[in-house]
Image (tube, rainbow, N blue to C red):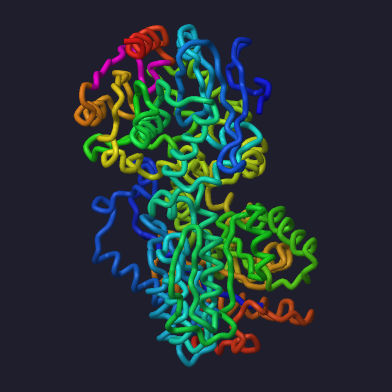
Amino acid sequence: MKISAFHLMPHRELPDDFEKRYHSVWVTPPWWELADARRVGQYYNWTLDELLYAARAGFDGVCTNEHHQNAYGFMPSPNLMGSVLAKLTNGTNVAIVQMGATLPTSNPPIRVAEEYAMLDCISGGRLVAGLPLGSAMDVSLCYGITPMEHRERYREAFALTLKAWQAREIFAWNGRYYQLANVNLWPRPIQQPHPPVWVPGSGSISTFDFAVDNEVCYCFLSYSGAKSAKAMMQGYWKVVADKGRDLNPYRAGFLQLVAVADTDARAEEKYARHVEYFYHKCLHWPVQWLTPPGNQDYRSLVATVTNPMRRRAEDLKRFRYRDFVEQGYVIAGSPATVRDRLKEEVVEGLRVGNLMVLLQIGSMPHELTLENMELFACEVMPALRDTWNDEGWVNHWWPESLRGTKPTPAIAGRAAGGA
Amino acid sequence: MTTARQNVHGADAGTRARTLSVWHDQIRIRVVSKGSGPAVVFFHGPWGLAWDPFLDDLARRFTVYAPEHPGTTPDTPDDAGKLDGLWDLVLCYDEVIDALGLDSAFLVGHSFGAMVACEMAAAYPDRARRLALIDPLGFWRDSDPVVNWMLMNPGDLPAQIFRDPSCEAAQRMFGTADDPTARVRVMWAMGVTGKFIWPIPDKGLKKRIHRLKAPALLIWGRDDRLVPAVYAEEFTKRIAGARVQMIHDAGHAPQLEQPETVARLVQEFLLA
């Protein structure tokens, strides 16, 4: 299987009473009260250093993502980050996994096609092209896209992107939302016919259909762990089967928060406050912003309103570290604990071939992040890497030149001595 | 095409409902009507049409036609997707007025619906005999931003819209907190009307409003916490002779909180 290090680039020093004093971490957090540009420059550099460290430690890929006006993740242009990573990982077998630039917030959306083609050229064909729908907060609240048009715009932009990469002739795009008279992308990607495409989703049935129909890797970027994703991912695999596709585990990606230490007890000592910071502060926003009126189509709205059990209404602000670990929101503990739980709950439980792990969590400082990454790479990853190999599946959703390779770790056993 | 009053929210025995097919048969518009006399077309606000005592009062002297905005009628949720923007909506309502057999009418609207009425009167000045606008949208002031109700917790909406959120009209508009049917109706109505005004409800009326020929009356709830009453100036400074009536003890829906007062003012103005 393929295992990638994911990063959100969060604010690591929000005030202790953040969630009491402020309305939301997203859309409305006041920059002048909460942040300092020089300090934020340090965050960006730490983020890049951490992902580069992961690349050297033997991860298969490094992932960045896009959010706007968001203190838990502020890479408004993930491609700026991806460009640095692409250049500095040249000569390695690490994939640049952009999860990714958001089509409906890019105007015209061929900007994403162009930048991804640039990244593929710079990286020598190591790009994984994540094409997310984007959240309502980013797309509608920050970037002004009408909620009811969000999905339609995405689907049109998706089709335009795929065509722009592949068309042999200059073409005109006369769409409902986008009109371009001379589409003629410079550059085109190295990977042919186009880089592998991953589509992140959050459980909506229409996205399952879309992912399977378009033969992309469906990725659940979850902060809630495998237990709450189980029924949803079963729904995805049912759609895969119903549409007559094989059950290739590389059709699925999943993001899991992970924290590794020498022992379970040490993990609690080292990580508890950062995990609680993440769930209490970083996920602090008015719940109705996830689905402003018009964001869901009518059938989804009816399903959500009439079946409130569809989403667990847990009050995460009351959970403590042990709750998050017990319920699998975070998989944390000794290498053996993490190995076993990841394999059983996530990899085999959800049938995931493309695993993403979030190892910098909330306020976690730079040095601790590197320790977490190193322990994961040395003590956990080797036991997972060969999963699915005996079944002979091909990861069509990974750069072809990297499918058979194993990154060579350039970092040796620093974690063995403990932190 | 005629249908029963089935599912018309708040409708009583005296109302009629029929469904018109417009937009090259792609959009069904249900029109609730009552009364006899000169035609009034009433455009409802962002929370769906509910037949109410104000409309009932108007129906004593007028034939009131209250079309439901595209997509807000049960069983037609996807019809709103046939329209791309405000220009399409105005054209669609031009077809509706034709389909009702009217050349012109008194145009009355509330909130989003008042903005639609004003846009209709700007696009088709001869269609509007007189224009009564109740807490209309259509303009934007940085100093007094319109509150975006679509970002609020639905449970907080009654208190934002009504001066007295426990009043019967608030219940009629929003239902009880645990009523999923009402929740779907209100959420969807906000979604399909929001399509025409997101993210700022200023879509260029300031460029078109000079085209109005009809006399206009502005009705505003003094305690409007959604579209502050200062917005009345945006209309009065652009519409020659326009009058403003502030309604005491009312928020964003004065015709629902003070129905007798507002109905009387509107009737007097329309018949003047």
Q: In this figure, what is the number of numbered marks? A: 0
User: Is residue B243 located in the magenta-colored stretch of the structure?
Assistant: yes
x then y, percent, for residue A172: 48, 72
Q: Is residue B7 above or below residue B249?
A: below
User: Is residue A28 located in the magenta-colored stretch of the structure?
Assistant: no
x then y, percent, for residue A391: 79, 79
Foreground pick, B264 / A253: B264
Q: Residue at x 30, y 12 (%)?
A: B248
- Which of the 4 image quadrants contains residue B222? top left
Left or right, B189 with reference to B215: right
Left or right, A109 with reference to B77: left
- Regarding residue A394, the answer to whether it shows in the image is yes
Quadrant showing the N terminus of chain B: top right
x then y, percent, for residue B185: 58, 31
Foreground pick, B177 / B207: B207
- Regarding residue A418, the answer to whether it shows in the image is no
Toward the bottom, the furthest residue is A91
x then y, percent, for residue A53: 45, 80
Q: Residue at x 36, y 29 (%)?
A: B126
- Which of the 4 image quadrants contains residue A85? bottom left
Foreground pick, B118 / B189: B118
Quadrant showing the C terminus of chain B: top left
Q: Is residue B146 above or below residue A188?
A: above
Q: Is residue B218 above or below residue A177?
A: above
Q: Which residues are magenta?
A: B242-255
Q: Residue at x 59, y 59 (%)?
A: A201
Q: Residue at x 39, y 70 (%)?
A: A366
